[in-house]
Amino acid sequence: MKRIFSSLTAVLTVLFVTSNSLFGEVKLPAIFGDNMVLQQKTDAAIWGTAANSSTVKVITSWNTKMYTVKAGTDGKWKVKVATPSAGGPYEISISDGKTLKLKNVLIGEVWVCSGQSNMEMPVKGYFNQPVTGSNDAITTSSNPGIRMFTVRKATSLQPVDDFTGSWQLCEPENVSEFSATGYFFGLYLNKILNVPVGLINTSWGGTRIEPWISESGIKKFSFVTLPDKNQQGTLSPQTPTVLFNAMVNPMVGYGIKGAIWYQGESNRNEADKYVSLLPGLVENWRALWEVGDFSFYYVQIAPFDYGTGGLNSAWLREAQLKASTAIPGIGMACIMDLGEKDNIHPADKKTGSERLALLALAKTYGRNGFAFSGPVLKDMKVEGPVVKLTFNFAANGLTSFGKELSCFEVAGSNKRFSPAKAFITDEGITLMCPYVNDPVAVRYAFKDFIVGDLFNTEGLPASSFRTDDWAAE
């Protein structure tokens, strides 16, 4: 009797395994789920696993079109669906015999939000570190046109196929925990474009840029050492490639319009490397995503008193300014007016986020009639003891909003900088310094912590800058 029972058990086990492989349930990565947003007017990729070698059928409710794809011998499949103009909600049905249905799907604009703690900082703020106006922003945040996804922190030495997270509705309890920079950016786009916006937050406080670049991307930088893939124990989030592998790779290929980035504080002592690492990250993500050269905009780090150790953070801000013109399709939002001497996380997240949105509206969406950049140095002329500066992105002129300009310095060939008197003129800025009779170089707001005081009349600030090429002190 026992022998018969054992044989029957074995047969049932084989039948169960066989039937499971023939009629396995469709499974999707976390990035695909109820409440998600798909990029409008594109061929949006959807992928997952199903029964080995099965035929997967995908039906989109916006056009009732059926797409079919054959899963591989490993069960993996991928299909691209044509998305319409913004709208919804819709449903997507996916089946290899058993149907999985995605509900409340919107079509709109999708943006990835990444970086370190200033991107991670939630709308409610950190403990004892507020976000200006957070309670009002949270209270009034219910919005059917915004959806949010936060990637749970993880590291990996190898690229993985999935991460943890889910699409959340735009309601106070969810907005409270979501990235403030991401939320205010998305809110501004939603208001101006009047379309649904999907925001994917993948960020980790205190991290350098190298962990966010893939292995293929980081190999281009000889000064970065790849990690030992056989290392044991807890994996530091500062290890090159490990955050890309765990927190970006699972969504590579998902239809997006662009990405926003707020990071750099942890790389401030290697400004000379960051100037190439930042464009390198952008090119790396674009190459792997295979959805075209999507837009990439970032916040310049704010002035902050880092103390006596390390490099003056103005050098990193300069690296970010240089990176903004290194490759097409990127741009920098300057927040020289928002820094706090004793808080590395500026409370005013809304202003910087909306400056990111201005870049997107102008450069990605082609909107006109408003400024999207602060003044950027165009030319310097020296006439005896007088220096004259002209600026781009200041068609309507410059202003200090009634304050004395106090952030300019000039130096002679001895490389010693002294404060300069600065005056706004019809042409730009005129500088004079009684201690420098033969000026050769100018620096503006080139300090660790300083409050910028030069703006265009639209209220967008100028970045710290210098005209010399002297080595960092």
Image (cartoon, rainbow, N blue to C red):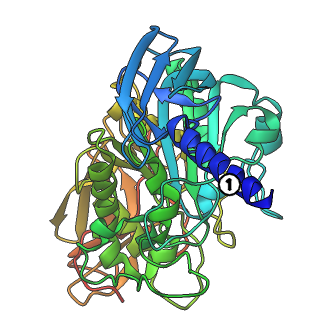
- 387 left or right, relative to 355: left
Read off the residue under disc 1. 7
The residue at the point 76 percent across, 54 percent down is: 5
Q: Position of residue 36 (x, y in %)?
A: 59, 31
Quadrant of the drawing holding the N terminus: bottom right
Query: Looking at the image, is 166 positioned above or below residue 64?
Result: below
Q: Amino acid at mark 1?
A: Ser
The residue at the point 59 percent across, 23 percent down is: 105
- 261 left or right, relative to 329: right
Q: Position of residue 304 (x, y in %)?
A: 58, 71
The residue at the point 38 percent across, 43 percent down is: 253
Q: Position of residue 457 (x, y in %)?
A: 44, 38
Query: Looking at the image, is 49 positioned above or below residue 406?
Result: above
Q: Position of residue 206 (x, y in %)?
A: 59, 72
Label 1 secondary element = helix
Q: Is residue 378 visible?
A: yes
The residue at the point 60 percent across, 43 percent down is: 15
Q: Residue furthest top?
A: 63
Tally of numbered tags: 1
Query: Looking at the image, is 371 positioned above or below residue 314?
Result: above
- 149 left or right, relative to 447: right
Quadrant of the drawing holding the C terminus: bottom left
| In-front residue for pair 87/134 | 87
Query: Looking at the image, is 345 positioned above or below residue 267?
Result: above
Q: Is residue 179 visible?
A: no
Q: Residues within 10 Å of mark 1 (few under 14, many from 20)?
A: few
